[in-house]
Image: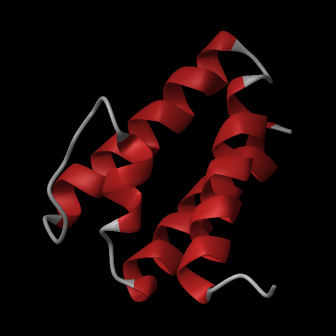
């Protein structure tokens, strides 16, 4: 079964987040801050720090694409 666009975007966001956090403690903090800052500043989905995946699912696909770009940038810069 083909993944829906929103599920693919969320999967990709958390892939780059996960890859970033294993690089080092510093990159872990940067990746976490990037994700949390984007979601809280976006204000288009209720923020739940305990359930970030649920929060990210609540974003529009446009916002997910933008967040994915930020997460990919963090990963590629420090990788």
Depicted 28 relative to depicted 16: above or below: above
What residue is rendered at 44% in x and 85% in y?
61
Name the one closer to the observer, 5 or 63.
5
Name the one closer to the observer, 68 or 57.
57
Residue at the top extreme? 25
Using residue 29 as the reference point, say whether residue 51 is left or right of it: left
Percent x, y for residue 38?
33, 55
Q: How many marks?
A: 0
What residue is rendered at 64% in x and 42% in y?
17
Q: For residue 51, what is the image quadrant?
A: top left
Name the one closer to the observer, 21 or 30.
21
Q: For residue 49, what is the image quadrant?
A: top left
Depicted 30 relative to depicted 47: above or below: above
Residue at the right extreme? 79
Quadrant assignment for the C terminus: top right
Percent x, y for residue 34?
44, 44
What residue is rendered at 70% in x and 63% in y?
12
Image colouring: secondary structure
Using residue 70 as the reference point, say whether residue 57 is left or right of it: left
Percent x, y for residue 46?
14, 56
Depicted 31 relative to depicted 11: above or below: above
Depicted 44 relative to depicted 11: above or below: below
Percent x, y for residue 65?
53, 79
Quadrant assignment for the N terminus: bottom right
What residue is rendered at 67% in x and 57% in y?
73
Using residue 77 as the reference point, say whether residue 32 is left or right of it: left
């Amino acid at each position: 079964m083909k993944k829906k666009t929103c599920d693919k975007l969320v999967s990709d966001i958390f892939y780059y987040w996960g890859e970033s956090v294993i690089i080092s403690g510093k990159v872990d903090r940067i990746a976490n801050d990037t994700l949390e800052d984007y979601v809280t500043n976006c204000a288009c989905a209720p923020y739940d720090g305990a359930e970030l995946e649920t929060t990210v699912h609540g974003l529009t696909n446009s916002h997910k694409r933008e967040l994915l770009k930020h997460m990919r940038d963090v990963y590629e810069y420090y990788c």
